[in-house]
Image (cartoon, helix red, strand yellow):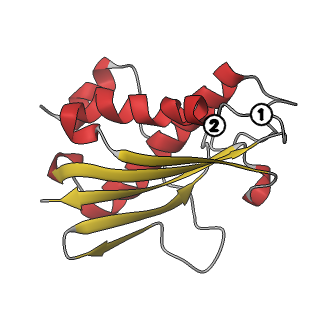
Amino acid sequence: MSIEKELNRLGLTLPTPAKPAGSYKPCIIVENTAYISGQGPLLEDGTFAKGVVGKDLDLETAQFHAQRCGLAILSALKAEIGDLNKVHQLIKITGFVNCTNDFTKQPLVINGCSDLMKEVFGNKGVHARAAVGVNSLPLGFSVEIEAIFKIN
């Protein structure tokens, strides 16, 4: 299965990788393991989605933002390894949701990314995960997600 063809079939395109907002690399490879720095919800126009879930944003919008984080993760990974078909397994994602104190559906928000990874990679996209609610994220992001992949 070609990952690029699967993305096209789903009507999705990878965004241009975002430039780091600090002193770090978007992706580091150590012994066939790729560590992807936290990625924000990069929209098609090159801007980032912002807002507080449960106040400014509803669940469905936040899920879409998590999907956009997933596409940004894949973009950062592809920029480092050249070919997404080299992915052996998505190991884990950690998702952070900028939300109100009473919002408790962080796992449903992060499903936006998790579902994308399973659709794109099949069983290789099923992963361990954490979904955490926070009261602020860098640059006002609504969602931020980091990932760990095993690479062939």
Q: Is residue 110 visible?
A: yes
Vertical comparison of 69 with 115: above or below: below
Residue depicted at 75% across the width and 22% down the height: 58
Q: Would residue 107 be found to the left or right of residue 7 on screen?
A: right
State the image coordinates of residue 84 (x, y, percent, origin top left).
Answer: 24, 48
- CA gap, disc 1 to disc 2? 8 Å
Mark 1: few/some/many CA within 10 Å (<14, 14-19, 20+): some
Q: Would residue 45 be found to the left or right of residue 72 on screen?
A: right
* Residue 106 - label: 2
Residue depicted at 69% across the width and 23% down the height: 59
Residue at far right of view? 55
Which amino acid, by three-letter code, is at mark 2? Answer: Gln
Which amino acid, by three-letter code, is at mark 1? Answer: Phe
Residue depicted at 44% across the width and 47% down the height: 129
Vertical comparison of 146 with 53: above or below: below
Q: Quadrant of residue 108?
A: top right
State the image coordinates of residue 96 (x, y, percent, origin top left).
Answer: 63, 50
- In this orientation, which residue lies closer to the viewer: 52 or 134? 134
Pointer 1 with pointer 2, Cβ within 8 A = yes
- Viewport quadrant of the N terminus: top left
* Residue 103 - label: 1
Callout 2: helix, strand or loop? helix
Q: Would residue 76 be found to the left or right of residue 91 on screen?
A: right
State the image coordinates of residue 110 (x, y, percent, origin top left).
Answer: 54, 36
